Amino acid sequence: MLCDLVWPMRARTAVAIAASLLVCCRRERPSLTAAVALLPSELPVYRAVVADFERASGLRVVVVPQQYADIRRALAAEAVAGSGTLDLVELDVYALASAAPHVCPFEPAEVKSELDALSADAVRAGTIDGLRFLPHRLGWQAVVYDHAVLGRPPDDWPELLAVARAHPGKVAFKGSLYEGLTCDVLPFVWAAGGSGDVLDDAGALAAFRFFAELAPYLHPESATFREPTVAEAMARGEIVLHLNWPFVMSLYASQGLSPEPVRSAPLPRGPRGRATVLGGGYLGIPCNAPHRAAALRLVHHLLAHDVQTELARRLGWFSPRGDVAVADGGEALAGFAAMRSEVRPRPARPDYAALSRRWQEAFRAVVFEHRDPDAVLHAAASDAARDR
């Protein structure tokens, strides 16, 4: 739940995914096909939840676990074909705008009970020319740190800089040129009072000056790190602190590393407070769905209070329902729970992908090329204004 959450598995092309789904559906003759981004450890629990729906409805469901990127490609391939096998898809919040043309809106009246219970901010993120997506699970980043080495996490920016100086090469960012880097950058911009929309406002300048101070002490492979690789680096003991999503805590727990020594903590406080980026999975019904009415029934089931409570309890998922508490993950999830009130959606604008790319390029220029932060951001802002 990620800026684009993945787990290690061989990439598939969109055509291959769509073809495999079609073959599967013809052979098994299921009532519904749902493509959901599930870790292998999550699949048995999710299938059990869906089995409750099957018993109550008399319908059959095939749950197809895939990476978000593969689900997006399959959805697009079926849209081009003009017919499909997918009845329900889960997409990451970052991809909603680009996938919106392939997903038909919900009528507010048919999901009224869900709208009354779901976080209004989370619902707004899925409202793109109509209510096209409903939040299935939410995610946001927190600090992941080595408690045995640090004792306690840094509370603010000066303390974070002190940790980096005391442990050179042991602090990391997800510095690859991809959306995950934007998810690391924006919390610092917001924490300094920046809008996230303007590349060179006062908050952005303050954040990037701070990045320039941190740069000499970052892990030398930061320029290549993504969610899985930075998590692996911590598991090997190469780093003592990074930012990541809740899913890594279950991975560390499976390795015997959490809640000790690996724990989570709130993001360090900036000049204007704390902030973190909204992530998570959203449910949508493709325009080509063969069984829309049945898919809608499955949506009602998945977003029901009891089911959301079960997913939170057994998988540690953060529910978009206001009446479902953050799962009690003890020290492992304490930092994520503490950040719940500080979650912000990414800028909602048609050119967000281009804006995000500029944030990424600016960070890499300042941190890895050691260029002047003010000059980099002013140039990026000028380029953005010219291109709009």
Image (spheres, helix red, strand yellow):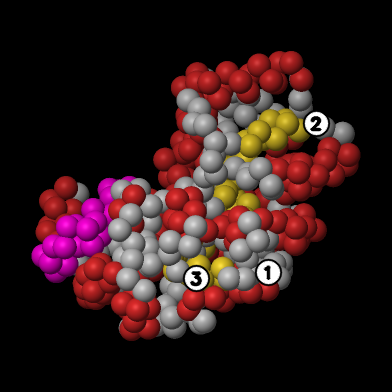
* Magenta highlight range: 350-375
Quadrant of the rendered image containing residue 56: top right
Alpha carbon distance from label 1 to label 3: 16 Å
Residue 306 in picture, x, y percent from top left: 80, 58
Disc 2: CA contacts within 10 A as few (<14), some (14-19) or many (>=20): some
Quadrant of the rendered image containing residue 60: top right
The kind of secondary structure element at disc 2 is loop
Report the residue marked by disc 3. 145
Q: Is residue 342 above or below residue 141?
A: below
- Are the residues flagged by discs 1 and 2 in contact, CB closer than 8 Å? no
Q: Is residue 312 above or below residue 4?
A: below
Front residue of 255 and 362: 255
Q: Could you tell me the amino acid type at mark 1?
A: Gly
Q: Could you tell me the amino acid type at mark 3?
A: Tyr
Report the residue marked by disc 2. 60
Report the residue marked by disc 1. 329
The kind of secondary structure element at disc 3 is strand
> Which residue is at 45% across, 50% downward?
229
- Are the residues flagged by discs 1 and 3 in contact, CB closer than 8 Å? no
In the rendered structure, find residue 221 and report the number of the disc placed on it: none
Q: Earlier in the sequence, mark 2 or mark 3?
A: 2
The kind of secondary structure element at disc 1 is loop
Front residue of 53 and 367: 367
Q: Is residue 33 magenta?
A: no
> Which residue is at 68% across, 73% downward?
330
Q: Could you tell me the amino acid type at mark 2?
A: Arg
Q: Earlier in the sequence, mark 1 or mark 3?
A: 3
